[in-house]
Image (tube, helix red, strand yellow):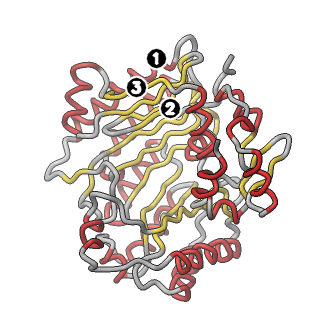
């Protein structure tokens, strides 16, 4: 029998942006006018629908709320306040409930930031992406490096916790330039960094331009050098890697994202949002309609915009949990893994490959945990391809 789940993580998707970044394959949309009232009402209705089934037989505990997008800092603060109030009424909020909103420097104003804080948001994640103005233009960002730093300072002053994103392995990026840029960013004193390697995603503007050979990306060796130096520089500012792409000061890890990587329950509402939720002994994968207006119409008609809801059998749970958990520095707790997936972790793994991976220094297996080492996490995709039976 599956034990009582840990606190629920709630993801709320706001699909609208001021402009579509050329590298972005997220579910984001540009509109001349954002229908704030309609989407506020629809999000609240879908949240009520999700809570009604999750709170059977008793109300679920709520550990985190994450407003993602799109650009959630384009939401009316009233919408944020109402959704937080609804969530903390429908569920039992943790005493240290983490409430994060994503924001871009171009959409940040002191009055709006302070209104989000007044609404209950206690953590901001700022999409800086770069401090280099030429790189920002290439990435299609509508802010400068100076504006980004000003936004970070503002976020740091208003919110108890603040994080920012950076993109590396950009065309022509040198190791020295990255070290300087990263040092400038971390010198602001934030407690969390999310780092993303620039990749070419199908269907994006960059995919078209890359196919035309308009630009090239650093080779694997150069990208690896940029990644490796990040941990060294982050450490000098007190941040340590806790996941492949995330660094934090002690106690400042994103509790919401940890729920994903630990394969715990998360409910997703809003256009295109995904979820993994427990209903009794069943774990469901859920997905909402991607198109904003169609999603809203479905919510208005049915109370929710779900287009896919699939039961995840134990073997698939185990594979998902393995893929997510080995990204973490802490690794996978074997007892929690078995309880959640109904599958002992060792039954997934090829014994000979596991032995070779341990001998090579890529994995460690103890009675309590399976953990990828730093070298193992750098080559996790190829490692898992060989490791899983």
In the rendered image, which residue does mark 2 sit on?
276
State the residue at coordinates (42%, 85%). 172
Give the answer, above or below, for where 49 lies relative to 107: above
Is label 1 in a helix, a strand or a loop? helix
CA neighbours of label 2 inside 10 A, class few (<14), some (14 to 19), many (20+): many
In this figure, which residue is indicated by the disc labeled 3? 309
Residue 382 appears left or right of 272: right
Check the picture and name the quadrant holding the N terminus: top right
Q: In this orientation, which residue lies closer to the viewer: 235 or 226?
A: 226
Q: Name the residue under label 1.
A: 53
Q: Residues within 10 Å of mark 1 (few under 14, many from 20)?
A: few
Q: Which of the pair 329/380 is nearer the observer?
A: 380
Q: Is residue 350 left or right of residue 145?
A: right
Q: Which residue lies furthest to the right in this view?
A: 367
Q: How far apart are marks 1 and 2 (CA)?
A: 13 Å
Quadrant the C terminus occupies: top right
């Amino acid at each position: 029998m599956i034990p009582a789940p840990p606190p629920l993580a709630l993801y709320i998707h706001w699909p609208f942006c001021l402009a579509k970044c050329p590298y972005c394959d997220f579910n984001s949309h540009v509109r001349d006018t954002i229908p704030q009232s309609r989407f506020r009402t629809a999000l609240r209705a879908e949240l009520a629908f999700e809570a009604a089934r999750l709170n059977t037989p008793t109300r679920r505990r709520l550990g985190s709320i994450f407003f993602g997008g799109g650009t959630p800092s384009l939401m009316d603060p009233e919408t944020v306040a109402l959704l937080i109030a609804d969530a903390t009424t429908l569920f039992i909020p943790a005493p240290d409930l983490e409430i994060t909103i994503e924001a871009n420097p171009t959409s940040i104003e002191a009055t709006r930031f302070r209104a989000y804080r007044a609404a209950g948001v206690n953590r901001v994640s700022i999409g800086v992406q770069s401090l280099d103005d030429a790189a920002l233009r290439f990435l299609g960002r509508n802010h400068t490096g100076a504006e980004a730093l000003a936004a970070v300072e503002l976020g740091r002053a208003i919110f108890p916790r603040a994080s920012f994103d950076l993109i590396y392995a950009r065309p022509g990026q040198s190791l020295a330039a990255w070290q300087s840029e990263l040092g400038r960013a971390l010198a602001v004193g934030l407690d969390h960094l999310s780092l993303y390697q620039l990749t070419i995603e199908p269907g994006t503007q960059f995919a078209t331009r890359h196919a035309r050979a308009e630009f090239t990306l650093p080779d694997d060796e150069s990208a690896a050098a940029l990644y490796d130096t990040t941990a060294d520089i982050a450490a000098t500012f007190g941040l340590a890697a806790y996941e492949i792409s995330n660094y934090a000061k002690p106690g400042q890890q994103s509790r919401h994202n940890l729920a994903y990587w630990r394969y715990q329950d998360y409910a997703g509402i809003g256009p295109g949002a995904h979820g993994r939720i427990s209903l009794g002994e069943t774990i469901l994968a859920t997905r909402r309609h991607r198109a904003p207006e169609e999603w809203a119409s479905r919510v208005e008609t049915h109370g929710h915009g779900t287009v896919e809801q699939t039961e995840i059998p134990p073997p698939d749970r185990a594979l998902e949990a393995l893929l997510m958990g080995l990204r973490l520095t802490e690794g996978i707790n074997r007892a929690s893994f078995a309880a959640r997936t109904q599958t002992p972790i060792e039954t997934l793994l090829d014994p000979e490959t596991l032995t070779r991976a341990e001998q090579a220094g890529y994995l460690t297996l103890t009675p309590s945990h399976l953990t990828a080492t730093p070298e193992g996490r750098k080559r996790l995709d190829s490692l898992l391809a060989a490791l899983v039976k």
